[in-house]
Amino acid sequence: MPIFIDFRLLELSMDLGTLERHFSRIEEEIARGEETANQELKDKWQALEFKDEAEWDLLRQERDFQLEFVLPRVLRCPFLVTLFTVYETAVTEIAKHIQDKRGLRISFDDLRGGLLSRARKYYANVLDFELSKSNRHWERITLLSDLRNAIAHRNGRLDLMSPGVGEKLLKIDGVSESFGYIVVDENFLRETFTLVKEELEGLVARYKQWDTEHRAWLQAEG
């Protein structure tokens, strides 16, 4: 019996699988970092010849800086940027496929504005194709876009963000401030990835269904 492999948008499926594995490695690395930092705290304390409360507080602050700021920021924030890039690539690629197959003159790049604004307009008004079926998913993608911009363009620094942007981001469950920078927790990262993955899988499924029906229509017309 022949095995059928659907190669349409296969690269996107591979990207999502890679990100899922990468997410697991990020949290494993943070857990290992916590163990290492706690052990280093104990070792440094034991190595001190003269122990006092001020020295203990200093060592503990160094440990907390590593756990609450360095590891979450260095490992989790770049993941959000990459996740949005995968979403952006998928949305533009599918739009291009539909445009080419329908012979439409207006392209995705002809529209102005941010990615999400252009995507909603292009899919609705030009392609007549459903971009998102879930308000919950779309709201999280909008938050991801805001976070991505804050991280990519302002390095996550609250003092460099436009007025009101930082305050808006800090109202999100799982997003907090650490030493003047935006950081996110594990639950937020996991939930965001899950919602974006579900959104893209739904979009891909709708595109494949449309593509199959479009090919059948072309064959019938031909």
Image (spheres, rainbow, N blue to C red):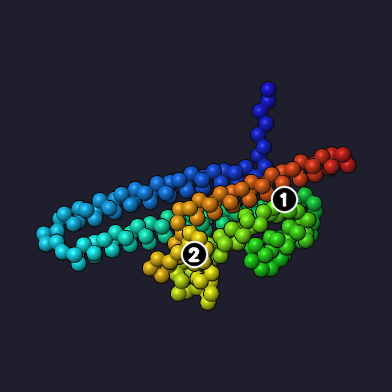
Residue at (43% x, 46% y) in the render:
25
The answer to whether residue 14 is left or right of residue 73 is right
> Element at badge 1?
helix
Between 171 and 117, the residue placed more toward the observer is 171
Do the CB atoms of the residues marked 1 and 2 lie less than 8 Å apart? no
Measure how far apart labels 1 and 2 are at the Cα level. 30 Å
Residue 151 tag number: 2
Q: Nearer the viewer, mark 1 or mark 2?
A: 2
Q: Quadrant of the N terminus?
A: top right
Q: Residue at x 56, y 60 (%)?
A: 144
* Residue 97 disc label: 1
Query: Which residue appears at 46% of the width and 71% of the height?
Result: 158
Three-letter code for the amino acid on which mark 2 is drawn:
Ile
Quarter of the image with the C terminus in it: top right
Q: Earlier in the sequence, mark 1 or mark 2?
A: 1
Q: Whole-percent x and y of residue 84?
A: 56, 57
| Residue 123 percent location from the top left of the image | 73, 57
At label 1, counting other C-alpha atoms closer than 10 Å, the crowd grade (few under 14, some 14-19, many 20 or more) is few
Closer to the camera in the image, 114 or 201: 201
Depicted 148 relative to depicted 132: above or below: below
Q: Which mark is residue 221?
A: none
Residue 180 locus on image (x, y percent): 41, 70
Name the outermost residue toward the left.
Answer: 49
Q: Amino acid at mark 1?
A: His
Image quadrant where residue 211 sits = top right
Establish if 215 lies above or below 173.
above
x, y (%) of residue 139?
Answer: 62, 60
Residue 23 against residue 107 in the figure, above or below: above
Q: Residue furthest bottom?
A: 163
Mark 2 nearby-residue class (10 Å; few <14, some 14–19, many ≥20): many
